[in-house]
Amino acid sequence: MSTATTDAPEATETAVPSFTVTFIIRRFDPDADSEPRWQDFDVEMFPTDRVLDALHKIKWEQDGSLTFRRSCAHGICGSDAMRINGRNRLACKTLIKDLDISKPIYVEAIKGLPLEKDLVVDMEPFFASFREVQPFLQASTAPEAGKERIQDVVARERFDDTTKCILCAACTTSCPVFWTDGQYFGPAAIVNAHRFIFDSRDDQAQVRLDILNDKEGVWRCRTTFNCSDACPRGIEVTKAISEVKQAIMRGKP
């Protein structure tokens, strides 16, 4: 007995075509340039490529002198924060398909911090403000030997949002006050103070509130929401700053 067989139709895959994207990057070489300059590069990209992929292609295939920071490339380290089409973003999380590729894509360093080279800025002023708010747990009593510090779910939720900060500086360098006032703590420092001010295990909240109750502290915030819009982790930065202001006025968290 013979058995007739039919071949199943072969599956066909439609390849997504690549396309050329023009990137205009603000360059600066301290050894050669007196002022930053713009330079354009044409790069073959796919829709799901990221801006970071484009920067890699430029550096590896067109101009090895292009300088930028990056580490994990997955939105965790925060090292590749930069201005893309006028907005602070992480290059590793910004997909080409989410940008208007009918126009050139502009890439430049974040604002408000000293420019070192190309897309790299000096982060020390940012971290100096971060350190000044004492962003670490301070408790006068130790937990029982071999035990953890107990905290219920409700108490943990009180500051959960501000634990997400990755110190990318996207929020701080999107703030117009920070651009013009070199003394302002900036949103990221206040966010990290918030994280411990409202932590029930910490007993030095008042110290941080006193630090931020300064003319260059929370009262410099003008509630423009730039910081919340820029945060790649979705932290409600402006809300956190408002809660710190309220705690100062109450005299307690």
Image (cartoon, helix red, strand yellow):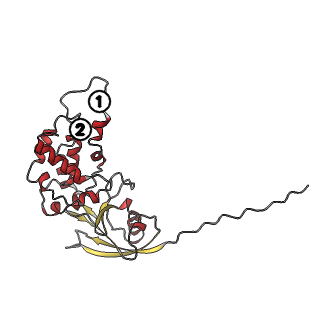
Quarter of the rendering containing residue 226: bottom left
Nearer to the camera, 73 or 196: 196
Identify the disc placed on residue 123.
Answer: none
Classify residue 31 as left or right of residue 11.
left
Classify residue 214 as left or right of residue 82.
left
Quarter of the rendering containing residue 85: bottom left
Residue type at the position of mark 1: Ile
Nearer to the camera, 95 or 59: 95
In the image, residue 23 lies at what x, y percent?
Answer: 36, 73
Which residue lies under the disc numbered 1? 150
Is the C terminus in the top left, top right, bottom left or bottom right quadrant? top left
* Residue in the image at 17% along x and 51% along y: 129
Q: Earlier in the sequence, mark 2 or mark 1?
A: 1
In the image, residue 93 lies at what x, y percent?
Answer: 38, 59
Nearer to the camera, 69 or 9: 9
Residue type at the position of mark 2: Asp
> Label 1: few (<14), some or many (≥20) within 10 Å?
few
Residue 132 appears in the picture as rendered: no
> Label 2: few (<14), some or many (≥20) within 10 Å?
many
* Residue in the image at 26% along x and 41% along y: 158
In the orientation shown, which residue stands out farthest toward the right? Answer: 1
Q: Is residue 112 above or below residue 143?
A: below
Dot 1 lies on which element? loop
In the orientation shown, which residue stands out farthest toward the left? Answer: 215
Which residue lies under the disc numbered 2? 199
